[in-house]
Image (cartoon, rainbow, N blue to C red):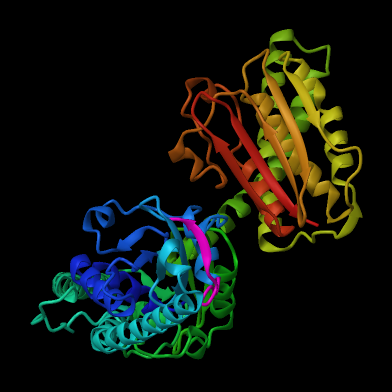
Amino acid sequence: MDDRQKFAGYLLTQLEHRALASWIGEISAQTFSGARDRIYLLDAHLRLFAHTDTVLAAQHLSLLGKGLFEGFQQPEDVLRAKAVGVSREYIGVHGEAMLGTWLAVPSLQVVIVVEEPQRIAYFSVHEMQRRVLYGSLAGIVLSIGVSVFLAHWLNTPIKQLVSAAQRFIDQDFSFRLPIQRQDEFAPVFRAYNDAAETLERYQKINIDRIIAERNKLDAALRQASDGMIVLDASRHVILVNHLFAQWFSLPEQDLSASPEPFEHYLTHESLRHHIESVYACSNTVVPAEFRVQMVGEVREIVLRGAFVRVLHAGELVAVLGALRNVTKEVEIDRMKTELVSLVAHELRSPLATISGFSSFIVENPALPSDTREIATIIYKESERLGNIVTKFLDLNRIESGRTEIQRIAFKLHDVIRTVVEINRPLADAKHIRVELALPSASTTIAGDPELIGQVVLNLFSNAVKYSPPNTTVRIQMLEHQHEMEVSVQDEGYGISASAKEKLFSKFFRAVDDERVRSVTGTGLGLAFVKEVVEKHGGKVGVESELYKGSRFWFTLPK
């Protein structure tokens, strides 16, 4: 049954019962020699709908499973049955023995019942059949007439409602329905007009607000000291400021109205690949660094920043990129590194000389004890300075690419176990318990096992060094689908949020806790860890809170 038929059935139930009952009574009187109660109507639930006995009709008496419909369990069975011409004997609603039949009209959701007392019906069987036939025909004529009337009456307003609904779907709230009606559609039309008027007002307010906010954002981006770009989920450029356009040779005009994706405008291959990776990955923030050769410039400029994936309800809605020109900072850092490297190289020879002579003095029993004690201090300090110089030079060689990273096959869990077992005495000296959570076997990876061993040693020795006695250090290795993950967790002093940002920088030491200041260190170990891991294509990070211990981790690709 389509929606029009359902709606027609609904409207039919709203017709005035008394008028309908009077009409049916007249048909019954014409058919059954003045008897007005021989024909009546039931609704789709087989409840008394229209009857000349108004008291009985008002009770909405259900005839499902009773009398003429004995044996039927569901109203749908009656609506689907075809009983015209089939007579049944039963006890009617007034307790009298009746003979009758029915006609289901599914399109109107009604059942027409025609009946007569058996004492009259059997007076002449042929007469009864004739009356039943006439009654059925009368019902058919009645249903056809009502259907034609309702179809004509409903056609225009339904078309108007469909048109209005389509306007709603298209977010066109300016359309209004005519309300000069006196029927059941009048409240519906008025409600639609009220809703459309309210939504139209809100739409205008929202559009004005969006335009104002966009103008503010556009002004802020264009005046920013950083290069900014905003793309939507469909990879179209929404906003780009002057700096970003200048760095990457983008057109100066507004690109938000262009149907072309960002690939159409970006000629810088590294930037294109990076933005594509941002759309493909699941990380919220993706760091970025680019080297750009500007027109008319001899040296490249260095740009650093990040691309942020903006999500709403788990769905990507935009990508925001922010880059800053850090060429001067990079140049200053390079000069500083070269200066310290030069000083470190120059220090190696005198430190070796100092260490050698002080060692000779310490081992000479002929010298006074106080002299040898002073020589011992000189020897230890020269060794410590020599160790710092060596670490710095190693780190500098890796950063500059002068140290070649070997690519040989090795088992990561074997390297970790060997490093920890050799250096376990460091933990034993402080009564620190070491827990190793390593798999019995793992996938072979390619890399430099010696440098990776130094990475593990740095993290393990730091965990022991910055943990109180009688605590636990846990070293764990996990194998994921595309990478290996190693973590070193301690119960030490912890690291503040501000210190974590600089933790992997050269010569930086987190000294939030006073107990850390008394522990000697070079500030180069974690910088070395970061450089080695990244040279292997991995990542490094830390999870820590002050006074709650730390968890350092790094990953290596398979």
Along the viewing direction, whichever of 38 and 497 lies nearer the viewer: 38
At 53% across and 62% down in the image, what residue appears? 286
Residue 526 at x, y percent in the picture: 63, 42
Along the viewing direction, whichever of 192 and 295 lies nearer the viewer: 192
At 51% across and 83% down in the image, what residue appears? 293
> Is residue 77 covered in magenta?
no
The image quarter containing residue 536 is bottom right
At 81% across and 28% down in the image, what residue appears? 423
Along the viewing direction, whichever of 399 and 303 lies nearer the viewer: 303
Along the viewing direction, whichever of 70 and 97 lies nearer the viewer: 97
User: Is 9 situated above or below 60?
Assistant: below
The image quarter containing residue 427 is top right
Residue 28 at x, y percent in the picture: 30, 74
In the rendered structure, the answer to whether residue 10 lies left or right of residue 394 reads left
Instruction: Give the magenta range.
Output: 81-91
Residue farthest to the front, as pictured: 123
The image quarter containing residue 458 is top right
In the rendered structure, the answer to whether residue 271 lies left or right of residue 424 reads left
